[in-house]
Amino acid sequence: MRFGHIDRIRAIAVLCMVEVHTAAIIPPEGISVGHPAAFVAAAFGGMAAPMFVTISGWGIHTSATRRAADPTHDTGMWLRWLAPRVLLLGLCQLLVNLLLNVDRGGRFEWHTPGVLTLLAVAALLAPVLIRLSMRSRAGLMLLMVASPLALGDASGTDWTWWERVGSQGTSEWLARLLWNGTYPAVPWLGFVLLGSIIHDLADEPSARERNIALGLVATSVTAAVAAYEGIPWALTEGEAVLTFFPASPAFLVVSGTFVLLAHRALEGSESSGGEPRGGERLEFLEPAGRITLTIYVAHFAVLGAVASAMQGEPRLELVPAFAATIAHTLIWIPLAVWHQKHIPEVSLESLLRRLS
């Protein structure tokens, strides 16, 4: 079955990741947290990672479910499916960290766990998770939403960025991977579980629409709480109702709602045999959606070179910085179209298929 809307969502997710990472490397001069441009950049950032992880969770669940349905799929075959994924995702995370390393003006330590190590954990858990009922996975997802309350200060509520990406020894590295890094398994596996639920509700759009309605009500409540308490509604970190580092329960609910909304909007009537929203007009996004891992890693090579070149240089003005950010984001669309037309086999995705 063709999943054009999934490729489109993947493309939008990875392009939003490119945008927010680029904005972080070349922030314009004189832009405060309250500036509209900063709010727009933060909004893209707040949606990019949840969408990226959710749709990756959908893909992992789909692939694992298909293999579990094969009666000949034994333990050895599971290992041959798991090992390349975990190894490749781990190596790509290491490569990303080296490309944007702090020693060259970047944002990561070489050993920093991140979104790709999160997906490696998700792959490791997939053979177990696909055996759980949707109700059980929904319950686990709700536990993930509530987990920041249980973690409390252990999640690093007052940490700086460098504390969150740094670790001394194996125990601290595991803590960053599991509960207090940039994309720790708890609570970010909640988005992987959301992706699996979207997979199971593919033929029940009305059920997803009810969940979207409930999520929008909860979103309105978070905005009302922010207004009543007189605190910001959303910040990357700090005192706000929605925070990204660490992910707050309100952030998990609101971002999950908008992921569901984006998925339903782009899906159109494809699940019932029709066309995804936008029909042929949005097909130009699909090539980028087929090589999201390749784009994710490759764009850090560009940003690493930029970060190294800009060390000690003054920040750009708003217009040049904005233009550079948008140009670097959009250039991956025609590059992906060219790639899929001429060298589709040269990609990390193609390598993973061959290894599996």
Image (spheres, rainbow, N blue to C red):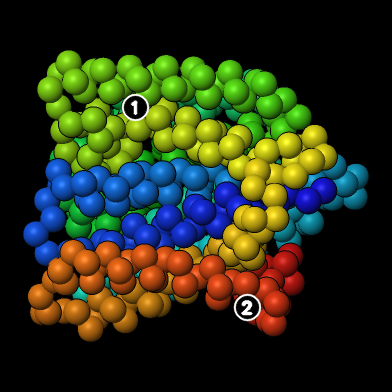
Quadrant position of residue 252: top left
Residue identified by numbered label 1: 250
Within-10-Å neighbours for mark 2: few <14, some 14–19, many 20+ = few
Describe residue 264's horizontal placement relative to residue 332 as left or right.
right
Residue 50 visible in rendering: yes
Describe residue 113's horizontal placement relative to residue 122 as left or right.
left
Q: At x 68% / y 81%, what residue is drawn?
A: 343
Q: Position of residue 159 (x, y in %)?
A: 17, 45
Q: Position of residue 294 (x, y in %)?
A: 55, 70
Within-10-Å neighbours for mark 1: few <14, some 14–19, many 20+ = many
Residue 289, placed above or below residue 254: below
Q: At x 33% / y 44%, what residue is drawn?
A: 43
Q: Position of residue 155 (x, y in %)?
A: 27, 38
Q: Under tag 2, what secondary structure?
A: helix
Quadrant position of residue 280: bottom right
Q: Under tag 1, what secondary structure?
A: helix
Residue 184 visible in rendering: no
Q: Which mark is residue 338?
A: 2
The C terminus, quarter of image:
bottom right
Describe residue 111's horizontal placement relative to residue 193 as left or right.
left
Quadrant position of residue 17: bottom left
Q: Nearer the viewer, residue 250 or 33?
A: 33
**Which sits earlier in the primary sequence, circle 2 or circle 1?**
1
Q: Nearer the viewer, residue 123 or 341?
A: 341
Q: Position of residue 332 (x, y in %)?
A: 50, 70
Q: Amino acid at mark 2?
A: Trp
Residue 345, placed above or below residue 188: below
Q: Residue furthest front?
A: 281
